[in-house]
Structures are given as C-alpha cells and as structure tokens.
Amino acid sequence: MKKNVSGMLAAGFVLALIVGLVSSAPAADSEADVERVCSACHSTKRICLVLGIKSEAAWKDTVTRMTHNGAQLPLSRVDEFAGYLAGLNKGQGPLCR
Ligand code: HEC
C-alpha cells in the first residue's frame, strides 16, 4: 500500500509539473498565434490602430466576429486572444510592426 501512495505522489508531482509548463507557455504562444491568425485577411496595422482603445469585452466581440469572418481559431481560444489583445498598449507589440 505504501508503495502505491508514493507512486501516486510521484504521478501527482509529474502532473503538476506538466500543468505548470503548459500554463506558463500561453503568453508567447498567444503572441505568435494572434500574429499568424489575425494577419491572414488584413494587415495587423488594422489591429494596431485600436490597441489600447478596445476593452477586453470589446476585443471578445471583435475576435468572435473575426471567427465569423473566417479566422482560423477555435472559439475556445477567443478569451485567450481577447486577453492578449486587451493587455497591449497603443502601438505596442509585433502587430504594430
Ligand atoms: C477571414 C478573414 C479575417 C481574419 C483571419 C481576421 N479578420 Fe479582422 N476583419 C476582417 C474583415 C472582413 C473586417 C471588416 C469587417 C468587420 O469589421 O467585420 C475585419 C476588421 C477588423 C478590425 C477593424 C474593425 C474593428 O472592429 O475594430 C479589427 C480590429 C480586426 N479585424 C481584428 C482582427 C483580429 C484581432 C483578428 C484575429 C483574431 C482578425 N481580425 C482576423 C476579416 C478577418
């Protein structure tokens, strides 16, 4: 029995490690994915123009509308994209290059 408990602890530790790695990744991933997905139809300058102006709720509406326009991202990532965009200041980041 003792063996099982420590085995479970080890499994829990490995799981925590994986979860930690996965949840620490999104920042860089969001940036690369937003840049890739959102540059398919129009210039990212169009997005750059409204950085620091739209609230996170407004970005959710915009990103959701882009999926209706045909943007290639799953609806489950709308919040992540909106959060990333809402966190950028005017003129900041790769979307403004
Ligand atoms: C499949 C093509 C397509 C993709 C991909 C796309 N857009 Fe758009 N976008 C459009 C079209 C068409 C318009 C103009 C009509 C409209 O506003 O819906 C537009 C307009 C915009 C505007 C200006 C209007 C406004 O609400 O301020 C912003 C900002 C914008 N897109 C952001 C984004 C973001 C962020 C992404 C990535 C999630 C994205 N777009 C991906 C097609 C696309």
Image (tube, grey):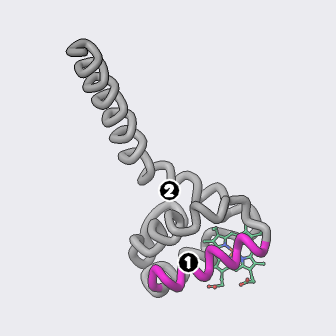
**Distance of mark 2 from mark 1, alpha carbons?**
16 Å
Q: Quadrant of the C terminus?
A: bottom right
12 or 51: nearer the eye?
Answer: 12
**Tag shown at residue 72:** none
- Please identify, in this view, whether the residue under mark 2 or under mark 1 is nearer the observer: 1
Q: Quadrant of ligand 1?
A: bottom right
Which x, y percent locates residue 92? 42, 69
Q: Is residue 84 left or right of residue 42?
A: left
Q: Does residue 62 belong to the magenta stretch?
A: yes
Range shown magenta: 55-69
Q: Which residue shows up at 45% across the image and 64% down it?
A: 93
Which x, y percent locates residue 59? 54, 79
Q: Quadrant of the N terminus?
A: top left
- Outermost left residue: 2
What amino acid is labelled 2 in the image?
Glu
Identify the residue position indicated by label 1 in the image. 60
25 or 76: nearer the eye?
Answer: 76
23 lies above or below 96: above
**Tag shown at residue 31:** 2
- Outermost front residue: 1
Q: Which structural element holds mark 1?
A: helix
Q: Which residue shows up at 36% across the image and 33% down it?
A: 15
Q: How many marks?
A: 2
Q: Which structural element holds mark 2?
A: helix
Q: Does residue 59 belong to the magenta stretch?
A: yes
Q: Is residue 13 left or right of residue 97?
A: left
